[in-house]
Image (cartoon, rainbow, N blue to C red):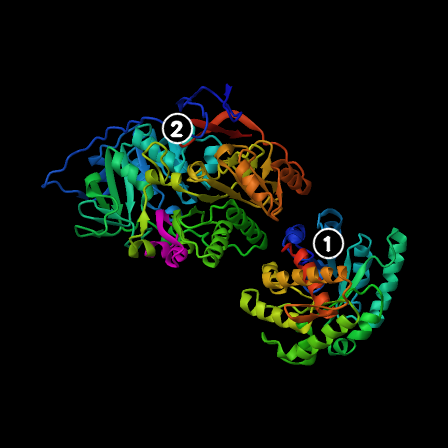
Amino acid sequence: MMKNILGREIPGYIEGYGIVTQFEGTFKRGGIKVKKEVKVNSVTPSDEKVLGSIEEVLDKVCLMDGMTISFHHHLRNGDRVLNFVVDAIARRGIKDITLAASSLFPNNIPLIKHIRNGVITKIVTNYMSGPVAQEISRGILKSPVIMHTHGGRARAIESGDLHIDVAFIASPTADTYGNINGLYGKSACGALGYAVSDAMCADRVVAITDNLVPYPTCPIEISQIYVDYILKVDSIGDPAGIVSGTTKITKDPVGLKIAKMASDVMVSSGLVKNEMSFQTGAGGISLAVAAELRKYMKENGIVGSFASGGITGYLVDMFKEGLFRSLFDVQCFDLEAIESYVNSHKHQRMSASMYGNPDNKGAVVNNLDIVILGATEIDTDFNVNVTTGSDGAIMGGSGGHSDTAAGAKLTIIVTQLTKARLPIIKDSVTTVTTPGESIDVIVTERGIAVNPKRIDIINKLKDTNLPIMTIQELKAIAEKMTGKPKDIKFSNEIVAVIEYRDGSVIDVVRRPL
Amino acid sequence: MPGNTPAMLQDAGILGADSIILDLEDAVSLTEKDSARILVREAIKNVDYSNVEVVVRINPFTTEFSQRDIDIIARVKPDTLMVPKATEEELKAINKILTEIEVQEGFDTGSIKLIPIVETAYGVENVYNIIKSCDRIVGVLLGGEDLTSDLGIKRTKEGEEVFYARNRVAIACKAMKVDSIDTPFTDTNDFEGLSKDTFKARSLGFTGKAAINPRQIDTIHSVYAPTKEEIKYAKRVLEAMEEAEKEGKGVFSLDGKMVDAPVINRAKNTIELAKLLVLV
């Protein structure tokens, strides 16, 4: 057992994962990179791509024991494709499948039985919530789940670290030759940024659609040159679950106060100026920060270069008002975002690789000035946990957290100082998702802490009226209200390996007792 | 803040208000009165409200709850008790009870202040006597909803129906040198309406306005906050005053206009308010 530079105890070899490359810092593994070779089954004019049933699909792609299959999560909690395919695989008696899903949600509950009966024995994902995450935390999976960042997943696929045998791409619209877009059809979800690397690098690619249209469809997000087969089904998703439910500005006065303070920090940093770039989440406080920024940009005639990430209607409104020249969209969070993506060429899709892959020739996150992020826990070294909850079980994951934090000039965490009677700031987080070296400022309702390494920001904030304090002081305020919670007890069994975006292991999750 | 909601009691002090009202009256149902009283007592004992004035709205003195409210809450020394539908007789009686508690607990006599709510026709007509009833009174809150109910008239957003009551309360308070706090604006999503209503209260002489939702605080402050130009002018008045004093001049002029005592007082008030709102 060794400790990495963050003091996390991680074995040099993990059963079911392999040899561990320890995390050494945010940009320690750059340099010349080699992309994997991709196997292509060439298609002739007489070949038919549209197949009649999932059984025929599984025959054609020669799905067998031990293979890796992949899915994207653009249909979120409304997705029907993942469960549909895995059920079909299970019916064939196929075992030992590695499931590489960009995220897993509560609706993936049928996976639990497939894990128990050995159909799925490995999972690779960027985010997981709900019963599957809880069960995996209890140790039902044979090998530890590997958790990537969004950019890290694209890197792993493109480098060959994560080899995909068959990618199943839920396609809101597909034509008869495999051109895909997410813009139209009853299950429209907008940009398909998370599916691009899968399509480009998997040995076999299957588009599963409930909106099969005559060739060619327009626009083309994922091209026919990557797609082997197309399957028409009745429904790929439940529209109610596709649109995210969190895209409203908070009305909570505490959240609004945090947002106002975060906005004051951004303005004081000097980064809020013409050509600025900005990313924020879809949560209530994150959107309230956008609302404050919008007000300031309007009052001061500021026009930014781009806003990025998962795009919400709120960012679309700012874009339409001329506050940003363009949008970089990896996934649309609501119908307004989808509509904007359809209608404006300046609302551009980006793939997960373009978004955050550290091993390409420059990701969008590298161009970010400011990112607003959340946290489940933060420690006094500014490390952030968004992977495990207060019971030690997995309830999330990095997604784009680590990617944007690494790239942005100013990374601000917005959070209430206490949540559900627990303090957010601890001596040591349960799980490190994002390293403290890429976190700059923490804004809570009771005070603001700046990473001591960011002397430039400290200097810019010291003459403001903002309640600046050390993270230890902030921790003391929280503990005065809540007391110090007991540490969670863990077994030695590793249930998840947390890979940083560069593929090194930043932490592991052990099974809580 | 409803007295029976721990999360709100915990966060009440950080929302930017100058005073917070922890409520035991209308926001608390009859079955929750006991628990609210205990929660408010513990909040005052344990939560750090820093420089924010802690006001507890007790139940009307005519109800069975008020004596217990006073006895439990006064012993943890809130800054102020707020008394609904208060008459001068009731305030005198409360003054007496508070004095006894203060002696028993070793607090300075008169240290717990009172803010009566004027929310009946009788209260409006009698507001001057209400303020005079005891030395603990530091302000009056006008309650527009109950007042219009008492008058049997409709409450409107424009508030013309409480124009007289506003005038009378604001002037009586000014005469007695206590704060006058305007009735809350009840549409919590209409910030433009809130701004207009607050501006009206300010122009009638109210020294503050009650917020019914924390999201209203910024708007109210922005109306009461002196503008950059007002602050700049006030600074120039006070600088000119200092110059004149050095030169031994009793009266002086600025920008060709005579500066007299009211102008100087207004300038002093502007700077004081600007300091309070951290604008200078």
**Residue A112 sits in which quadrant?**
top left
Is disc 2 on the same chain as disc 1?
no
Amino acid type of the residue tagged 1 in the rendering: Val
Residue A72 as seen in the image, left or right of residue A54? right
| Magenta part of the chain | A316-339
Q: Position of residue A425 (x, y in %)?
A: 59, 38
Q: Position of residue A4 (x, y in %)?
A: 49, 23
The residue wearing badge 1 is B40
Camera-nearest residue between A417 and B35: A417
x 32%, y 42%: residue: A351
Check the image and report above or below for A185 versus A478.
Answer: below
Q: Secondary structure at mark 2?
A: loop
- Tell me if I can see residue B103 in this picture: yes
The residue wearing badge 2 is A503
- Tell me if I can see residue A103 in this picture: no
Camera-nearest residue between A42 and A391: A42
**What is the chain identity of the residue bearing mark 2?**
A
